[in-house]
Amino acid sequence: MPRPTPTDIPVIAIDGPSGAGKGTVAVAVADSLGWHLLDSGALYRAVALVARREGLDLRDGPALANLISDLDLAFSAHGVMVAGVDETLAIRHDAVGGAASTIAAIPEVRTALLATQRRFREPPGLVADGRDMGTVVFPDAVAKIFLTASVESRAQRRLLQLHHMYRLNETLPGGTVSRRSQPVVPEFDALLLELEARDARDRERTVSPLMPAPDAHTVDTTAMTIDEVVSTVMAHVAKHVP
Ligand code: DC
C-alpha cells in the first residue's frame, strides 16, 4: 500500500480563544477517534518560556526564529519536555501565556512554527487545537470547530484549572516539577484583565488573527458543561468523519 500523502490524512481543527474548552475537547475527540493530538498553544508557550529565560527581546523576529530552529521540544502523554526537562507546568504560568501571545504576533515566529505543526499530521488522523488551525495551518481540515464563551466564564474555568494543576503538583512526592516553576494562581480580576488583553492581541494581530474559518462550525460554550461541549462537537465531527 502506498504511504498516504499528508493531505490524505484527515485533520479536525478546533480553534477559539483561551479558556473556551478547546484543550479538553481536543483530547476527548482525539481519544475517541484514536487520532494524534496537536496542542499548538503549547508550542508557542514553549518558545516563549525559553525566550524569556534566555532574555531575548520578544519583538526580535529573527532571533526568535533562530531559537525555534534549535529548540529541542518533545510532547509525551504526560506533557511537554524542553531540552529533556519537564516544563508542563512552567509553560502554564500566565506570564508565559502573555509572552506566547506577544511572540505569536510576529510573522517570523508563525512561519518558523508552521512546518513543526504540520509534522504532527500522521495517520490515522490529527486533532489540532489553536487559533489558526482551520484558517492557516490546516485549511483543508475535514471538520472545523470554533469554540467561544464569555470572557467571565473563560476566566472562571481558567482559575479552576490553575487551582487543579497546583493541587495536583502538591499531592505528588516533591511535585512533578520544581517548586520554582509552579504556577502562581492569580486573582479572578487579574485573570479577567489578562484574558481580555490576550484576546485583543490574538484578534487584532495582522498575521493569522484569531477568527473562525468561513467554513467553521461555531459553538458558544458559555452555558454548557464540558460534557455537553464534547458531545456537541462529537456530533458535528461524526458528520464529517465516517
Ligand atoms: O492556547 P494557549 O492559551 O495555550 O495559547 C497561548 C498563546 O499562543 C495564545 O495567546 C496565542 C498563541 N497561539 C497562537 O497564536 N496560535 C495558535 N495556533 C496557538 C496559540
Image: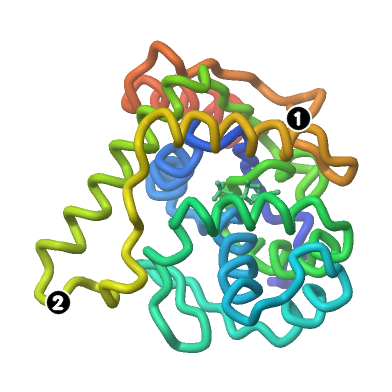
Mark 2 against mark 1, which lies toward the viewer? 2
First along the sequence among labels 2 and 1: 2
Q: Residue at x 14, y 77 (%)?
A: 174
Residue at 29 percent across and 74 percent down: it is: 177
**Dot 1 corresponds to which residue?**
211
User: Residue at the spot x=74%, y=27% of the render?
Assistant: 212
Residue 174 disc label: 2
* Residue 96 x/y as whole percent: 54, 59
At 62% across and 42% down in the image, what residue appears?
A: 12
| Rendered image coloring scheme | rainbow
Three-letter code, disc 1? Met
Which image quadrant: the N terminus? bottom right
Q: CA distance from mark 2 to mark 1?
A: 41 Å
User: Residue 64 location, x and y as percent?
Assistant: 78, 73
Find the residue positioned furthest to the top.
223
Quarter location, residue 93 = bottom left
Looking at mark 2, is its residue's CB closer than 8 Å to ligand 1?
Answer: no
Q: In the image, residue 42 lies at what x, y percent?
A: 55, 59
Q: Nearer the viewer, residue 203 or 57?
A: 57
